[in-house]
Image (cartoon, helix red, strand yellow):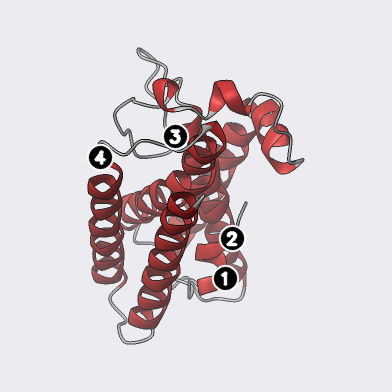
C-alpha cells in the first residue's frame, strides 16, 4: 500500500505542478504557438519521467495496476494529446474571419462525432462503472504505441482503453476550447482563448 500511495502521490503532484506551470506561462506570452510547444514539451518530459519511474515496477496488486492505467496514465497522455490538437489548429485554421468560424464549427462537429462513436465507453467512465476495469485497465492490454490527434488509425485500431480514455479526456478539453473559441468569435474576438488550470485539470 505504501508503494501505491507513493506512486499515486508522485504522479498526482507532478501533474498538478505542470498544470500550474502551463497556466502561469500562458499569462506571460501572446504567442499561442510558442505556448503550445512549451506546454507539450513540459508535459512530455513529465510523462517520460513517470515512464522511467514505473519501468520494471511491480504493482502491489491489481487495484494499484488499474489505478495507474485508469487514472494516472490517461491524465498525462490526454494533456499531450490536447496540445497536439491545439498545435494542429494553429497550423490549419484559415486566416480570414469567416474561414476561421467555419473551421472551428467543423472541429466542434468532429469532437462530437468522436465522442458519439465511443459513447458506450464514455458512459462507462462517467458513471463510475468498474465492472470491466480488470479487462480495460491492466498492463497487458495497454502496451500499444501512442497515436496523437483526433483521427484514429483506421488500419490498426488501438484497443488500449487507457489510451482511449486519454483520447476522450483530451477531446473533451479540446471541445471546451473550441466552444470558447466560437463564443469569442461571435463577440468579434478570434484570438486564442485563455486555457485555465481548471480546464487542464478537468476530469472529463
For the residues marked 4 and 2, what is the alpha-carbon distance in whole angstroms? 27 Å
Q: The residue tagged with tag 3: helix, strand or loop?
A: helix
The secondary element bearing badge 4 is classed as loop
The one nearer the camera, 32 or 145, is: 145
Residue 172 appears in view = yes
Image position, residue 29 (x, y; %): 30, 83
In this rendering, the label closer to the viewer, 4 or 1: 4
Residue drawn where x is 67% and y is 38% of the image: 125
Q: Is residue 172 left or right of residue 124?
A: left
The answer for how far apart the CA atoms under marks 3 and 1 are is 22 Å
Which mark sits nearer the N-terminus, 4 or 2? 4
Mark toward the start of the polypeptide (4 vs 1): 4
Residue holding disc 1: 198
Q: Residues under labels 4 and 1: Cα distance?
A: 30 Å
Q: Are marks 2 and 1 in contact (CB under 8 Å)?
A: yes
Dot 2: element: loop
Instruction: Kindly report which numbered mark, 4 or 3, lies closer to the viewer in this rendering.
Output: 4
Mark sitting earlier along the chain (3/2): 3
Q: What crowding class fits label 1: few (fewer than 14 Cα within 10 Å), some (14-19), or many (20 or more)?
A: few
Q: Which mark is residue 202?
A: 2
Instruction: Please give the residue where the numbered disc 4 appears in the rendered image.
Output: 55
Amino acid at each position: 500500500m505504501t508503494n501505491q500511495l507513493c506512486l499515486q502521490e508522485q504522479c498526482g503532484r507532478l501533474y498538478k505542478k505542470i498544470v500550474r506551470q502551463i497556466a502561469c506561462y500562458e499569462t506571460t506570452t501572446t504567442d499561442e504557438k510558442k505556448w503550445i510547444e512549451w506546454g507539450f514539451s513540459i508535459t512530455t518530459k513529465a510523462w517520460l519521467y513517470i515512464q522511467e519511474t514505473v519501468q520494471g515496477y511491480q504493482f502491489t496488486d491489481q487495484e494499484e495496476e488499474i489505478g495507474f492505467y485508469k487514472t494516472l496514465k490517461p491524465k498525462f497522455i490526454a494533456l499531450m494529446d490536447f496540445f497536439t490538437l491545439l498545435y494542429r489548429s494553429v497550423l490549419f485554421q484559415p486566416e480570414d474571419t469567416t474561414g476561421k468560424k467555419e473551421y472551428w464549427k467543423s472541429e466542434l462537429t468532429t469532437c462530437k462525432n468522436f465522442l458519439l462513436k465511443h459513447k458506450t465507453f464514455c458512459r462507462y467512465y462517467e458513471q463510475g462503472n468498474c465492472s470491466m476495469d480488470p479487462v480495460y485497465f491492466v498492463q497487458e492490454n495497454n502496451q500499444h504505441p501512442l497515436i496523437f490527434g483526433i483521427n484514429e488509425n483506421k488500419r490498426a485500431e488501438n484497443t488500449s482503453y487507457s489510451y482511449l480514455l486519454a483520447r476522450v479526456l483530451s477531446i473533451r478539453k479540446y471541445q471546451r476550447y473550441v466552444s470558447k473559441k466560437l463564443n469569442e468569435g461571435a463577440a468579434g474576438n478570434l484570438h486564442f482563448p485563455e486555457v485555465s488550470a481548471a480546464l487542464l485539470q478537468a476530469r472529463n
